[in-house]
Image (spheres, rainbow, N blue to C red):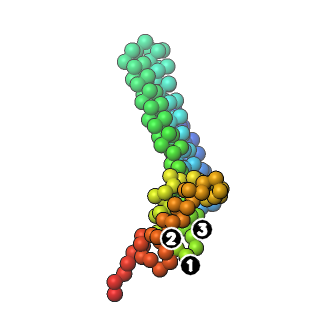
Protein backbone atom coordinates (compact mmCIF):
# COMPACT_ATOMS: atom_id res chain seq x y z
CA UNK A 1 0.00 0.00 0.00
CA UNK A 2 2.82 2.45 0.83
CA UNK A 3 4.54 1.74 -2.47
CA UNK A 4 1.28 2.53 -4.27
CA UNK A 5 0.89 5.82 -2.41
CA UNK A 6 4.49 6.77 -3.22
CA UNK A 7 4.01 5.90 -6.90
CA UNK A 8 0.76 7.86 -7.14
CA UNK A 9 2.31 10.92 -5.46
CA UNK A 10 5.32 10.80 -7.79
CA UNK A 11 3.20 10.49 -10.93
CA UNK A 12 0.76 13.16 -9.78
CA UNK A 13 3.61 15.50 -8.86
CA UNK A 14 5.18 14.98 -12.29
CA UNK A 15 1.90 15.67 -14.08
CA UNK A 16 1.29 18.83 -12.06
CA UNK A 17 4.88 20.08 -12.53
CA UNK A 18 4.84 19.51 -16.29
CA UNK A 19 1.42 21.16 -16.57
CA UNK A 20 2.62 24.13 -14.54
CA UNK A 21 5.69 24.61 -16.71
CA UNK A 22 3.74 24.31 -19.96
CA UNK A 23 0.94 26.63 -18.89
CA UNK A 24 3.31 29.19 -17.41
CA UNK A 25 5.12 29.68 -20.73
CA UNK A 26 2.17 31.42 -22.35
CA UNK A 27 1.48 33.64 -19.32
CA UNK A 28 -1.18 33.25 -16.67
CA UNK A 29 -4.50 34.06 -18.29
CA UNK A 30 -7.86 33.27 -16.72
CA UNK A 31 -8.13 30.20 -18.94
CA UNK A 32 -4.70 28.85 -18.02
CA UNK A 33 -5.42 29.34 -14.31
CA UNK A 34 -8.68 27.43 -14.67
CA UNK A 35 -6.89 24.68 -16.61
CA UNK A 36 -4.22 24.35 -13.92
CA UNK A 37 -6.85 24.07 -11.20
CA UNK A 38 -8.72 21.52 -13.30
CA UNK A 39 -5.58 19.41 -13.70
CA UNK A 40 -4.81 19.55 -9.97
CA UNK A 41 -8.35 18.67 -8.88
CA UNK A 42 -8.65 15.89 -11.46
CA UNK A 43 -5.25 14.42 -10.57
CA UNK A 44 -5.87 14.48 -6.84
CA UNK A 45 -9.42 13.18 -7.27
CA UNK A 46 -8.37 10.28 -9.49
CA UNK A 47 -5.53 9.30 -7.16
CA UNK A 48 -7.85 9.41 -4.11
CA UNK A 49 -10.40 7.31 -5.99
CA UNK A 50 -7.71 4.79 -6.84
CA UNK A 51 -6.66 4.56 -3.20
CA UNK A 52 -10.28 4.18 -2.05
CA UNK A 53 -10.93 1.40 -4.52
CA UNK A 54 -7.71 -0.29 -3.48
CA UNK A 55 -8.92 -0.08 0.15
CA UNK A 56 -12.26 -1.65 -0.79
CA UNK A 57 -10.52 -4.49 -2.64
CA UNK A 58 -8.17 -5.10 0.30
CA UNK A 59 -11.18 -5.24 2.65
CA UNK A 60 -12.97 -7.76 0.42
CA UNK A 61 -9.93 -10.01 0.24
CA UNK A 62 -9.56 -10.13 4.00
CA UNK A 63 -13.33 -10.09 4.66
CA UNK A 64 -12.94 -6.98 6.81
CA UNK A 65 -16.23 -5.04 6.76
CA UNK A 66 -14.75 -1.97 8.47
CA UNK A 67 -12.09 -1.61 5.77
CA UNK A 68 -14.73 -1.96 3.07
CA UNK A 69 -16.90 0.72 4.69
CA UNK A 70 -13.87 3.02 5.07
CA UNK A 71 -12.96 2.49 1.42
CA UNK A 72 -16.51 3.13 0.25
CA UNK A 73 -16.73 6.27 2.41
CA UNK A 74 -13.38 7.40 1.00
CA UNK A 75 -14.66 6.94 -2.57
CA UNK A 76 -17.97 8.73 -1.93
CA UNK A 77 -16.35 11.71 -0.20
CA UNK A 78 -13.79 11.95 -3.00
CA UNK A 79 -16.51 11.90 -5.66
CA UNK A 80 -18.53 14.55 -3.84
CA UNK A 81 -15.54 16.85 -3.23
CA UNK A 82 -14.19 16.44 -6.76
CA UNK A 83 -17.59 17.09 -8.28
CA UNK A 84 -18.03 20.23 -6.20
CA UNK A 85 -14.56 21.52 -7.13
CA UNK A 86 -15.03 20.75 -10.82
CA UNK A 87 -18.38 22.55 -10.91
CA UNK A 88 -16.79 25.57 -9.21
CA UNK A 89 -13.87 25.58 -11.65
CA UNK A 90 -16.15 25.26 -14.67
CA UNK A 91 -17.94 28.48 -13.63
CA UNK A 92 -14.70 30.29 -12.85
CA UNK A 93 -14.47 32.29 -16.09
CA UNK A 94 -18.14 33.25 -16.27
CA UNK A 95 -19.07 36.87 -15.78
CA UNK A 96 -16.70 39.79 -15.48
CA UNK A 97 -13.15 38.42 -15.14
CA UNK A 98 -10.14 40.74 -15.13
CA UNK A 99 -9.31 39.98 -18.77
CA UNK A 100 -12.86 40.72 -19.86
CA UNK A 101 -12.85 43.97 -17.93
CA UNK A 102 -9.64 45.00 -19.69
CA UNK A 103 -11.23 44.26 -23.08
CA UNK A 104 -14.18 46.51 -22.23
CA UNK A 105 -11.81 49.23 -21.02
CA UNK A 106 -9.85 49.00 -24.28
CA UNK A 107 -13.10 49.69 -26.21
CA UNK A 108 -13.78 52.83 -24.19
CA UNK A 109 -13.23 56.16 -25.92
CA UNK A 110 -11.42 58.31 -23.29
CA UNK A 111 -12.22 61.49 -25.20
CA UNK A 112 -15.93 60.80 -24.78
CA UNK A 113 -16.24 58.88 -21.47
CA UNK A 114 -14.52 58.38 -18.15
CA UNK A 115 -13.34 54.81 -18.76
CA UNK A 116 -13.59 53.54 -15.16
CA UNK A 117 -17.15 54.82 -14.98
CA UNK A 118 -17.81 53.26 -18.41
CA UNK A 119 -16.69 49.89 -17.04
CA UNK A 120 -18.75 50.28 -13.85
CA UNK A 121 -21.91 51.15 -15.77
CA UNK A 122 -21.31 48.33 -18.25
CA UNK A 123 -21.03 45.87 -15.37
CA UNK A 124 -24.26 47.21 -13.85
CA UNK A 125 -26.26 46.98 -17.06
CA UNK A 126 -24.99 43.66 -18.48
CA UNK A 127 -24.55 40.32 -16.70
CA UNK A 128 -21.48 39.41 -18.73
CA UNK A 129 -19.35 40.92 -21.50
CA UNK A 130 -20.75 38.56 -24.14
CA UNK A 131 -24.24 39.92 -23.46
CA UNK A 132 -22.88 43.44 -23.84
CA UNK A 133 -21.14 42.62 -27.11
CA UNK A 134 -24.20 40.91 -28.58
CA UNK A 135 -26.52 43.75 -27.53
CA UNK A 136 -24.29 46.50 -28.90
CA UNK A 137 -23.54 44.56 -32.09
CA UNK A 138 -27.18 44.49 -33.18
CA UNK A 139 -28.35 47.99 -32.26
CA UNK A 140 -31.50 47.89 -34.38
CA UNK A 141 -32.81 44.75 -32.66
CA UNK A 142 -31.89 45.97 -29.15
CA UNK A 143 -32.60 49.67 -29.66
CA UNK A 144 -34.25 50.27 -26.29
CA UNK A 145 -31.44 48.69 -24.29
CA UNK A 146 -28.72 50.38 -26.37
CA UNK A 147 -30.42 53.78 -26.01
CA UNK A 148 -30.74 53.28 -22.26
CA UNK A 149 -27.06 52.27 -22.02
CA UNK A 150 -25.89 55.26 -24.07
CA UNK A 151 -28.08 57.66 -22.07
CA UNK A 152 -26.67 56.28 -18.83
CA UNK A 153 -23.12 56.69 -20.10
CA UNK A 154 -23.78 60.22 -21.34
CA UNK A 155 -25.29 61.29 -18.02
CA UNK A 156 -23.05 59.39 -15.57
CA UNK A 157 -19.69 59.15 -17.35
CA UNK A 158 -18.96 62.17 -19.51
CA UNK A 159 -15.33 62.93 -20.29
CA UNK A 160 -13.66 64.69 -17.41
CA UNK A 161 -16.10 63.42 -14.79
CA UNK A 162 -14.70 61.79 -11.71
CA UNK A 163 -17.62 59.39 -11.32
CA UNK A 164 -16.35 55.90 -10.62
CA UNK A 165 -12.72 56.97 -10.34
CA UNK A 166 -10.52 58.13 -7.51
CA UNK A 167 -10.33 61.77 -6.66
CA UNK A 168 -7.10 63.25 -5.35
CA UNK A 169 -7.24 66.43 -3.32
CA UNK A 170 -4.00 68.35 -3.24
Horizontal and vertical percent for residue 164? Answer: 42, 70
Horizontal and vertical percent for residue 57? Answer: 49, 19
Question: Quadrant of residue 145 in the image?
Answer: bottom right
> Residue under circle 2?
154
- Mark number displayed over residue 107: 3
Q: Residues within 10 Å of mark 1 (few under 14, many from 20)?
A: few
Question: Quadrant of residue 27 in the image?
Answer: bottom right
From this view, report whether residue 133 is shown above or below residue 41. Answer: below
Describe residue 117's horizontal placement relative to residue 104 as left or right. Answer: left
Decide which of 40, 168 is in the foreground and name it: 168
> Residue under circle 1?
111
Horizontal and vertical percent for residue 88? Answer: 48, 43
Residue 170 seen anywhere in this rendered image of the structure: yes
Q: CA distance from mark 1 to mark 2?
A: 12 Å
Q: Which secondary structure, mark 3?
A: helix
Q: CA distance from mark 1 to mark 3?
A: 12 Å
Q: Which secondary structure, mark 1?
A: loop
Q: Nearer the N terminus, badge 2 or badge 3?
A: 3
Amino acid sequence: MYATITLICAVLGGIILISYLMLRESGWTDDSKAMMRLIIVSGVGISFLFLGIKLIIRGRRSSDKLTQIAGLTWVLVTLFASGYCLSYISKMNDGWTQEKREKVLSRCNPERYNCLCYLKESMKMFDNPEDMTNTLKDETKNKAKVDKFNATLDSECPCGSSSGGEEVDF
